[in-house]
Image: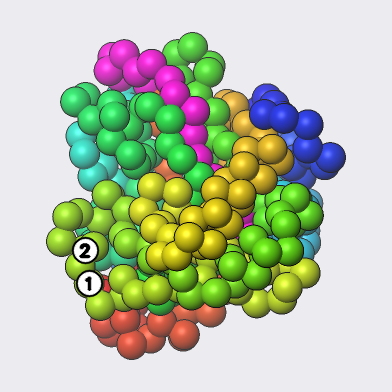
């Protein structure tokens, strides 16, 4: 299981579970069935359908934890499950190219997609990682300071794709390899713990459309000028349990009170954050509606054994983005 380290002194730990060996073996056997049978292209609707059916056959304890999290994601909006199979003995070298994705079925891609189907439906964006459903999060030579999944310097707090009319509801990561020095940390901070630290004035400001969030660098330079870069609120929904849309790098406050509120929100996230140092087989589910995440710095060696996570996005309601998805697929084309 990962080391769960507080950045400060949060009151509640991230929900964490460990599969027993029998359940791990059952998951691996089921995942292997998705790597055979003639259909092995992760992005094909037929393969996703097979993964959706296979979800029902995963061990009950795993399905129960995911189901409970789906109903309410808890104070941190984060679920860790250790002991998932990743077939380390058969792993190729960690990819070192920009835009790396997983197109062909593997044990890890099968695990990610089955869990995604348990949460809702997998989702991807054509402008990011070529619309692949399973994406590699790996350091890339020459992009150490890139503020995104290819970098290795600190990554600031953000929700995924808050600029888009249809951001994912969940982000799921699976660790295939840890970094050499075991210092890379996934940082998470939930609104349910940060909200009490905000002043009434800042809460009110964060609920007003006085912020502009543009696409992250991973979407390319042309995306920032799109029609969806309009003023939005950082918080929305219930005042006592709001949703978040925010990325510290690309969310710009448009008024002085918005700037004050955003800074205060950032400090509240820092005060309540936790750092997760993942080991192979650790699966992290982040409720993207109520939790921001980021990353600490680490030192890649580009020797084939660097840190390697795989990621997929999930929506609980695929239909609401129907006008963005050609042929009713899983890829948002705009």
Q: Is residue 61 left or right of residue 128?
A: right
- Residue 162 in the image: x percent, y percent? 44, 64
- Foreground pick, 314 / 89: 314
Q: Quadrant of the N terminus?
A: top right
Highlighted magenta segment, given as a residue range? 289-306
Question: How far apart are the two marked residues, 1 and 2, measured between alpha carbons?
Answer: 6 Å
Dots 1 and 2: beta carbons under 8 Å?
yes
Would you say residue 140 is visible in this rendering?
no
Residue drawn at point x = 63 percent, y = 31 percent:
275
Residue lying furthest right in this view? 11
The residue tagged 1 is 226
- Residue 125 in the image: x percent, y percent? 31, 65
Classified by dominant secondary structure, the portion drawn in magenta counts as loop
- Foreground pick, 260 / 129: 260
Above or below 22: residue 313: below
Give neighbour class at mark 2: few <14, some 14-19, many 20+ (Cα, 10 Å).
some
- Foreground pick, 111 / 300: 300
The residue tagged 2 is 223
Magenta stretch: includes residue 301 = yes
Which type of secondary structure does the marked residue at label 1 adopt? Answer: loop
- Residue 5 in the image: x percent, y percent? 69, 26
Residue drawn at point x = 39 percent, y = 58 percent:
252
Residue drawn at point x = 46 percent, y = 70 percent:
210
Magenta stretch: includes residue 322 = no
Would you say residue 165 is visible in this rendering?
yes
Which type of secondary structure does the marked residue at label 2 adopt? Answer: helix
């Amino acid at each position: 299981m990962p080391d769960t380290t507080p950045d400060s002194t949060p009151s509640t730990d991230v929900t964490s579970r460990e599969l027993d060996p029998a359940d791990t073996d059952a998951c691996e056997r089921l995942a292997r069935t998705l790597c055979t049978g003639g259909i092995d292209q992760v992005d094909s609707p037929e393969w996703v359908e097979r993964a959706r059916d296979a979800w029902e056959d995963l061990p009950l304890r795993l399905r129960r934890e995911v189901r409970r999290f789906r109903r309410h994601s808890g104070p941190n909006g984060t679920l860790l499950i250790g002991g998932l199979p990743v077939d380390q003995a058969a792993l190729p070298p960690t990819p070192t190219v920009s835009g790396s994705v997983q197109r062909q079925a593997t044990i890890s891609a099968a695990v990610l997609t089955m869990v995604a189907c348990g949460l809702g439906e997998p989702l991807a964006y054509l402008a990011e990682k070529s619309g692949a459903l399973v994406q590699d999060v790996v350091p890339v030579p020459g992009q150490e300071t890139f503020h995104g999944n290819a970098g290795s310097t600190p990554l600031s707090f953000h929700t995924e794709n808050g600029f888009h009319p249809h951001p994912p509801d969940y982000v799921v990561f699976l660790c295939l390899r840890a970094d050499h020095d075991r210092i890379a940390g996934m940082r998470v901070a939930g609104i349910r713990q940060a909200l009490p630290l905000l002043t009434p004035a800042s809460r009110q400001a964060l609920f007003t459309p006085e912020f502009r969030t543009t696409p992250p660098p991973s979407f390319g330079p042309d995306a920032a000028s799109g029609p969806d870069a309009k003023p939005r609120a950082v918080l929305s929904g219930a005042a006592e349990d709001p949703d978040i849309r925010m990325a510290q790098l690309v969310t710009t406050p448009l008024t002085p009170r918005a700037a004050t509120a955003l800074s205060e929100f950032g400090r509240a996230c820092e005060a309540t954050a936790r750092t997760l140092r993942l080991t192979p087989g650790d699966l992290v589910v982040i409720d993207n509606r109520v939790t921001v995440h980021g990353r600490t710095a680490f030192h890649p060696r580009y020797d084939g054994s660097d840190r390697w996570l795989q990621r997929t996005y999930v929506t609980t309601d695929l239909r609401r983005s129907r006008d963005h998805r050609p042929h009713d697929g899983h890829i948002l084309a705009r």
